[in-house]
């Protein structure tokens, strides 16, 4: 009996480890849920995701570094070989936008709210240079470059991905001045970025508490 229980426990453990891959939410939508290990080199356990349309793939957030972006990309490629057309930064904090370089190199258009594009332009290079302040080692950030969004908007932006409508909606000021959510009206799926935290205290230094409460 004990042996059987051990076997069941091992199977469960193996199954849990496999969840590092993308999780299917609907036919064409997957989440990439942060690891339980919330260390800086694991993107502080930030979540990401993808939407697959007829014409290509839209990536929601790119994690903290080129290395983390590559990990994400390798897991995306297990699901689809379609071109990665768009990257949306729900906001431009390092754990959501410093992997942009991996996807921009593939020709993806990077999109964010204009205020968060400005935030990244202002502080991105400095944060990368002083990444040790965030508990990151030089090897964690090897190959990482700052890629600013080339498309930005003020209120709403709708993307037709070919059979998949993706709505980007500003819900700010909240976590940042230009935080956006990614809403899929067909599936009723919402990528909330850092508007909503579970199990962690939110990072609030760029936040607006009154606006955040209203947003939620
Ligand atoms: Zn954030």
Image (cartoon, rainbow, N blue to C red):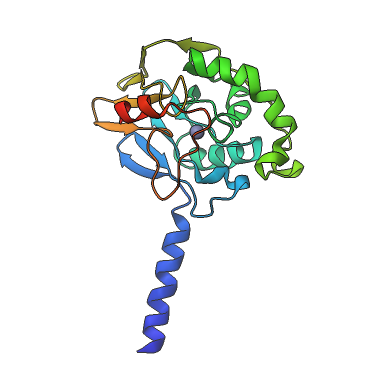
The N terminus appears in which quarter of the rendering?
bottom left
Q: Is residue 65 visible?
A: yes
The reply, left or right, for residue 84 in relation to residue 166 is right
Quadrant housing residue 215: top left
Q: Is residue 52 visible?
A: no
Q: Position of residue 137 (x, y in %)?
A: 73, 45
Total marks in image: 0
Q: Is residue 133 above or below residue 173?
A: below
Residue in front for this viewpoint, 125 or 14: 125
Q: Position of residue 141 (x, y in %)?
A: 70, 38
Q: Seen from this angle, which residue lies furthest bottom?
A: 1
Q: Position of residue 208 (x, y in %)?
A: 43, 26
The reply, left or right, for residue 98 in relation to residue 199 is right
Q: Is residue 127 above or below residue 134?
A: above
The reply, left or right, for residue 209 in relation to residue 189 is right
The C terminus appears in which quarter of the rendering?
top left
Quadrant housing residue 150: top right
Q: What residue is rendered at 42% in x and 62% in y?
A: 15
Q: Seen from this angle, which residue lies furthest front?
A: 210
Q: Position of residue 165 (x, y in %)?
A: 31, 20
Residue in front for this viewpoint, 216 or 36: 216
């Amino acid at each position: 009996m004990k042996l059987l229980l051990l076997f069941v426990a091992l199977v469960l453990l193996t199954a849990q480890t496999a969840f590092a891959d993308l999780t299917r939410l609907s036919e064409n939508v997957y989440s990439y849920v942060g690891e339980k290990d919330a260390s800086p080199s694991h993107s502080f356990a930030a979540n990401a995701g993808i939407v697959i349309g007829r014409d290509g793939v839209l990536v929601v957030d790119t994690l903290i570094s080129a290395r983390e972006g590559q990990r994400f990309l390798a897991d995306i490629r297990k699901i689809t070989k379609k071109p990665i057309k768009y990257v949306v930064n729900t906001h431009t904090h390092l754990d959501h936008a410093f992997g942009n370089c991996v996807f921009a190199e593939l020709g993806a258009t990077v999109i964010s709210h204009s205020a968060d594009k400005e935030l990244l332009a202002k502080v991105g290079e400095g944060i990368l240079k002083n990444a040790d302040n965030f508990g990151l080692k030089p090897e964690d950030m090897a190959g990482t470059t700052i890629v600013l969004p080339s498309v930005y908007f003020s209120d709403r932006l709708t993307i037709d991905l070919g059979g998949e409508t993706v709505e980007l909606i500003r819900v700010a000021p909240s976590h940042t001045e230009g935080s956006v959510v990614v809403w899929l009206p067909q599936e009723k799926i919402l990528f909330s970025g850092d508007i909503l935290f579970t199990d962690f205290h939110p990072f609030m230094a760029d936040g607006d508490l009154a606006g955040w409460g209203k947003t939620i």
